[in-house]
Image (cartoon, grey):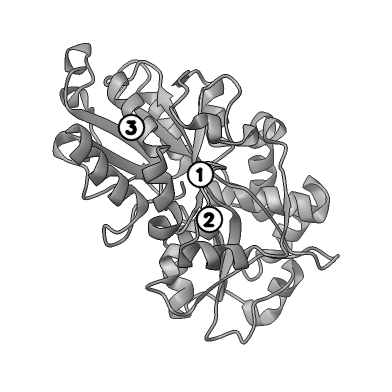
Amino acid sequence: MRTHLKPMAAVTGCLALAATLSACGGSSAASDEKVVTVYSADGLKGENNDGWYDKVFADFEKKTGIKVEYVEGGSGEMVQRTLREKTNTQADVLVTLPPFIQQADAKGLLQKYTPAGSDRVDGADKAADGAWTSVVNNYFGFVYNKSELKTAPKTWDELLDPSYKEKVQYSTPGVAGDGTAVLIKAMHDFGGKEPAMEYLKKLQTNNVGPSASTGKLAPKVDKGELLVANGDVQMNFAQSKDMPNLGIWFPAGSDGRATTFALPYAAGLVDKAPHTENGRKLLDFMLSEQAQQQVSAVGGGFSARSDIEATDANAVELAKLIEGVEVFEPDWSDIGTHLDDYVDAWKTATGS
């Protein structure tokens, strides 16, 4: 979702290499292999192999005998990698945050497939034509250091205070899904592109600089190297279990209303996937009742299925986190169409 390209320990054999993966099942002859390759935004795999992906992939392999080979990177990076490999497709399943899943669809990288259980996913969280479906719901947010700051900041403007000099950092828009979300929320809260860019230009005085990885910002906040950074509820909630100084908050505009928006992990079957049938099976499994019941308890996220009523301790805490926070719905069609323009405007404003 958010980080530089980072093959994980779960990736096996030649998939771990950055070179061509043709020997790992890129041909039609490999279609019967007991393997499925996932390109995904980060956040769902645990630092200690204890995340939702870890549990779901292990259960899937136990049930089907199909091994999951996993590659992780920023949402934008995963789309670009899939695009580069279009003539020699390596990935079977692509998981990114919006608007990158819509971008992947627009570039012809996804084939239509309606997973079992997707009828329980709200219409706003899936493509009408079956090109992609959310598998874990989530919300955009920020983190702060609870030890250094007595209370969470309330507004964007507080971050302009000199006390935050070189203590603020956010991930790179256009590369990281959460970095792109900074632009989306700022444009909403400030009432448009121009005022949002004016603010982000001012914030540069305190900003450490762009980061390719959102996931690496939380540890810096926990240690006090930063006071504030961007993130998202699911990832940061999971990280907070091992980072006691990490607190989650939602910046408010001048009207004082804290806002956020849904930022789900959305999955699609890659066009001309080398293991299409295995990809279908994995998507079905990810949306199964078994896997969706584990989204909050194991992954610290929100189930994508409306019929799953999680009551575990994590689910209770997560509900409290967003209680009273105004949730707006971005115009993903507009954002997908004008994303490059918004990122260029950010680069101009910040000199990045």
Mark 2 belongs to which amino acid? Ser
Residue bearing mark 1: 175
Residue bearing mark 2: 171
Q: CA distance from mark 3 to mark 1?
A: 26 Å
Residue bearing mark 3: 282
Q: Earlier in the sequence, mark 3 or mark 1?
A: 1
Q: Secondary structure at mark 2?
A: loop
Q: Nearer the viewer, residue 308 or 149?
A: 308
Answer whether residue 67 is visible to the viewer in this image.
no
Q: Nearer the viewer, residue 100 or 309?
A: 309
Q: Nearer the viewer, residue 176 or 350?
A: 176
Looking at the picture, does residue 40 appear above or below residue 236?
above
Horizontally, residue 131 falls left or right of residue 124, namely left
Q: Earlier in the sequence, mark 2 or mark 3?
A: 2
Of the two numbered discs 3 and 1 in the rendering, the one whose residue sits closer to the viewer: 3
- Asked whether the beta carbons under mark 2 and mark 1 sit within 8 Å of each other, the answer is yes
Q: CA distance from mark 2 to mark 3?
A: 30 Å
Q: CA distance from mark 2 to mark 1?
A: 8 Å
Q: Position of residue 139 (x, y in %)?
A: 59, 53
Q: What is the number of the mark on residue 61?
A: none
- Asked whether the beta carbons under mark 3 and mark 1 sit within 8 Å of each other, the answer is no
